Amino acid sequence: MKAARQTRYPGPIAQAAKHRHGLVEQGFASDAALAEILHRYPASLIDINLYDYDAEGQVSLRTGDKGDLTGEQLLAAIQGGRLWVNLRDAQEGCPDLWAAAMEEFGKVEATYPGMRAVTNAGQLIISSPVARVPYHFDAAGVVLFHLRGRKRIFVYPGDEAHLPEACMEQVVARQTTEELPYTLAFEQDAQVFDLEPGEALTWPLYAPHRVENLDKFCVSLSMDFQTWPSRFRNGALYTNALIRSRGGRPRFTDTMSTPELAARWAASLALKRVGGLKSRIAHFERDFVPDAQAEDGAGALRA
Ligand SMILES: [Fe+2]
């Protein structure tokens, strides 16, 4: 029996699935390799996040600044703390790892008939043994290559209850950061995958997910990709955000044909050219500097 699609959006990936990859054997996740990457990574591309959760699973976020730490010091703060570090634009920041990962991506892509990525980008995620990432979705296809440690990924259905389109519009139009409304009741709908080094996980376009590290220091490369259909749909969501901001009631994109989606994508390009919706994501003030000696790995900001 063929398992049901776990999303209302069309696309080659109908349900979350594991794949194998060969990045670990190539030595990319050793302490020495990671310290080197952290040391020379452009500071403007490093996000250092510290998440806290209340009893209802609601999240709050503090952010850190690398300051003048060496790569080794930052690595030590991550390994002993409670930090989640994203090295964005890995395609530029760690080109050797990226080139190897693109080869692995090609193998994953080949297993899905009709899947044709037109752009790939990614982030190298280096995170503390107890770190967790809150419930969110990505406006792209994702292949998560796991390199070190163990992590548990919870993947949820891509339906209106778990992924309201009005919220997706806000994220795509950068009116909010990437969190969706979440309640603990969603947990009964989750599919759960434990990832070991050498395994990769992919899931349907937009499927909400969250991550828990399983008491081990973790390294993963999260590769996101766009296809022409995902580009069209993101553009349509952007245009719908603008229509909604002007009091309109746009239709759900899953009821739109490809020509309608393409027309709304084209409209989104024109809207962006004339200023469209101004991003409301404020420039974050940093809250701390990583410190291996400090509680949670988060030291005080120096004035
Ligand atoms: Fe994600």
Image (spheres, grey):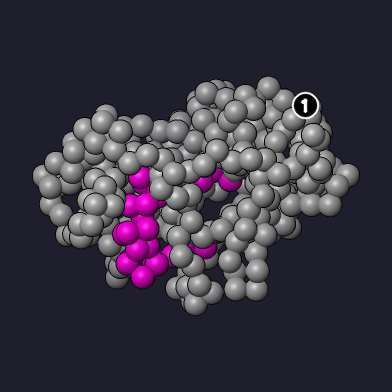
Q: Nearer the viewer, residue 164 or 277?
A: 277
Would you place residue 51 above or below residue 113 in this image? below
Q: Quadrant of the N terminus?
A: bottom left
Q: Is residue 162 visible?
A: yes
Q: Residue shown at 48%/56% (left/top)? A: 179
Q: Position of residue 173 (x, y in %)?
A: 35, 45
| Neighbour tally class for label 1: few under 14, some 14-19, many 20 plus, Cα within 10 Å | few
- For the record, the magenta segment spans 144-173
Q: Which residue is mark 1?
A: 68
Q: Quadrant of residue 239?
A: top left
Q: Would residue 210 appear left or right of 25 to someone viewing this image?
A: left
Give the amino acid at mark 1: Asp
Q: Is residue 198 visible?
A: no
Q: Residue shown at 55%/38% (left/top)? A: 283
Q: Position of residue 143 (x, y in %)?
A: 46, 45
Q: Residue shown at 62%/34% (left/top)? A: 46
Q: Quadrant of the C terminus?
A: top right
Q: Please check the rendered image and state whether residue 169 is part of the magenta-colored stretch, yes or no.
A: yes
Q: Position of residue 164 (x, y in %)?
A: 35, 63
Q: Please check the rendered image and state whether residue 215 is part of the magenta-colored stretch, yes or no.
A: no
